[in-house]
Image: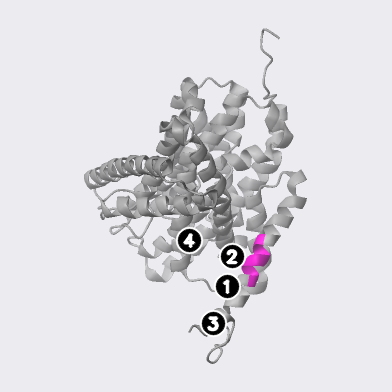
Amino acid sequence: MDWHLLGVSVGPAVEGSITDESRLLGVGLLFLYVIVADRYLKSFNIPTNAIILFLGLLVVPLAGNNPFQVPGEFIHVLHLTSLNLILFTSGLSTKISTIRQSIKFIFSIATLSCLLTAVITGGLFFLITSPDFGAINFGIYETFPLGAALLMGACLSDTDGEAALRCLGDLRKKIPERLQNTIQFESLLNCATTIILFGLFASFYFQNFHDSHFIVGSTIGQTFGAITKSLIALFSTGVVDGVIFGYLANWLFKTMQIKQSRYLAAGIAIVFINYATSNFLGGSGLISAFIAGLFINNTDSECKSSVANLKTSIVPFNEAAEIFICIAFALQVNIDKVIECMPLGILCGFLMMFIARPASIFLNQRLSNLRWNELLLLSWCGLKGPVTFAVSFELVELISEFPGLQTSVSGELASEIQSVIFVASLFNLLIQGISLNWVATKLNVQERPSLSS
């Protein structure tokens, strides 16, 4: 019998160790903090993710970095589980018929604009900090590698459309439906694109970037040809597996009388088996998770009630997982490094918000039926979400393998990258989240009355 499960202490206590009771109490208090703080700060339009990042600034100075002593392997599994659910739910929430008129524009900004945001943010950051160009380092690691800058840009290319719409408050009701759909569905597709971009950039810089990270399948080499072939295999296999599992899920819903209380278990079973099978066959399980959700929601009209039950069951679980991702990221922060890297983090956030994001949106203007003021508001809806924090954790773990980087400085660079992303994300959430309602009002973005009225 495992006496620990009964609350009985077995064996001598280890000095400085954290008990399971302390961990569970701490996690419970952190979730309660998020709920209470979000309730009382709602009127200020402060995004929930910003509230959670502030948590790190409050807890870490008192309890230390990683106060619950959670191993990195556990956090990696948590991220993998959460991202599967996030992408599956994204596909499950994407109704193609509602975005048919603007699908080219939405697909373009969710993919091409995501790439441009990553490249522009990372590229400008590298140029400004490089000794050969701007030579502005603010006292951090003097030679910031281009690969690390691009990977950082990939992490920051994610957007959280739901958070942006929540920040609009009551004004959301006056926003044109086509703009609301664009904001929402861009972020749904953006989740998958961010992860793919991260894997694409990593494959150029890490010789053995493989299935221990998010873009999974066979080992990817460093040549462009090998990367292209691997990505084609990952996409094609992932898409095919997603379609097959989506079809099987619809068959399951129609032939099995699943109780409403069992839909969460059914959804988790579909996602996990799908992910494992796709990886085993050489595809990307994360891409497959998104395609499976997309197929389920857009193919069989007889499964509408099942899809509704599945979303009702899995979305709250998914939201809890997203909060856990943000908390894990916040509690890993190094306060001294955050203070040291604050100017550079703010600079990175500025590049992302005022240059990269607007440029990436307006370069796709020809595909859009949105007015210029609506495009401006869309470019301001670039709030960072849990995908940014999850892939950032993976980036910090990867830095020790960065080619040409001495082991003695890899830890220092990893801490600096984490701090820059932390500051840039918090800067983004506070500036854009709090001002989003005001910006929408000033831009006069509201539904125009029809001619008949």
Q: Is residue 354 left or right of residue 303?
A: right
Residue 4, labelled with which disc? 3
Amino acid marked by disc 2:
Leu
Question: What's the distance in space between the residues labelled 2 and 1, CA to CA?
Answer: 9 Å
Give SS at disc 2.
loop
Q: Name the residue under label 4.
A: 78
Instruction: Between residue 150 and residue 289, name the one nearer to us.
Output: 289
Q: The residue under label 4 is which amino acid type?
A: Leu
In the rendered image, is residue 173 in sight?
Answer: yes
Question: Which stretch did the figure color magenta?
Answer: 25-31
Q: How is the image coloured?
A: one colour
Could you tell me if the residues under marks 4 and 2 are in contact, i.e. CB atoms within 8 Å?
no
Q: How far apart are marks 4 and 3 (CA)?
A: 23 Å
| Cα–Cα gap, marks 4 and 2 | 15 Å
Report the predominant secondary structure element of the magenta stretch.
helix
Mark 4 or 2, nearer chain start: 4
Residue located 54% across and 74% down the image: 69
Q: Which residue matches tag 2? A: 331
Instruction: Find the distance from the CA under tag 3 to the CA under tag 1.
Output: 18 Å
Q: Mark 1 points at which residue?
A: 68
Please state if 370 lies on the left or on the right of 196 as rendered. Answer: right
Crowd tier of the residue under label 3, counting other residues whose Cα lies within 10 Å: few below 14, some 14–19, many 20 or above: few
